[in-house]
Amino acid sequence: QVQLVESGGGLAQAGGSLRLSCAASGRTLSSYTMGWFRQAPGKEREFVARLTWTGFATYYADSVKGRFTISRNNAKTTVYLQMNSLRPDDTAVYYCAGRTAGASSYDYWGQGTQVTVSS
């Protein structure tokens, strides 16, 4: 079992930056593809970014490409989402999730952290 806990959310102004963290307990993330998702009020949850379990490949939603960066620490216990050039439409609850290598869906989810961007 892996427990995921997000932190780092808060209030930012448009054009500002925030860094979200997703800390894992129970085991390292070395064998998990990790993703960030977000859900804005009244909208469905959407994909934001993904880091493959090898740590060598990243994928981003078009809406955040060039502004957000997903990474993990060398100990493979924490995944980050660096968010730059924030916009009001980035406002959402952000969730990290883990997917076992080879699995088709995410097995583990964090509780979410609120990000609010003011104009």
Image (spheres, rainbow, N blue to C red):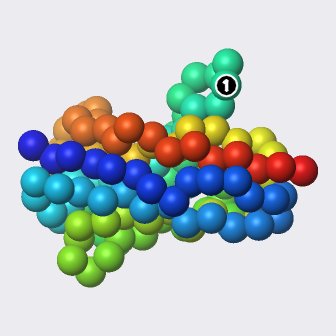
Residue 41 in picture, x, y percent from top left:
67, 25
Q: In the image shown, does 90 or 12 lie closer to the viewer?
A: 12
Residue at the front extreme of this rendering:
10
In the image, taking residue 9 as reference, residue 53 lies left or right, namely left
Pick the quarter of the image with the N terminus. Answer: top left
In the image, taking residue 83 as reference, residue 29 lies left or right, namely left
Do we see residue 42 in this rendering?
yes
Q: Secondary structure at mark 1?
A: loop
Q: Eyeballing the image, is 61 above or below 85?
A: above
Residue at the image position 56 percent from the left and 54 percent from the top: 9
Residue at the image position 81 percent from the left and 59 percent from the top: 13
Quarter holding residue 74: bottom left
Q: Eyeballing the image, is 41 above or below 112?
A: above
Identify residue type, mark 1. Answer: Pro
Residue at the top extreme of this rendering:
42
User: Which residue bears the numbered disc 1?
Assistant: 41
* Count of numbered tags: 1
Residue 61 in picture, x, y percent from top left:
60, 48
Q: Eyeballing the image, is 53 above or below 94?
A: below
Residue at the bottom extreme of this rendering:
74
Q: Eyeballing the image, is 55 above or below 109?
A: below
Residue at the image position 25 percent from the left and 39 percent from the top: 108
Q: In the image shown, does 100 or 87 lie closer to the viewer?
A: 87
Residue 2 in picture, x, y percent from top left:
16, 47
Residue at the right extreme of this rendering:
119
Do we see residue 35 in this rendering?
no
Quarter holding residue 92: top right
Q: In the image shown, does 80 or 69 lie closer to the viewer?
A: 80
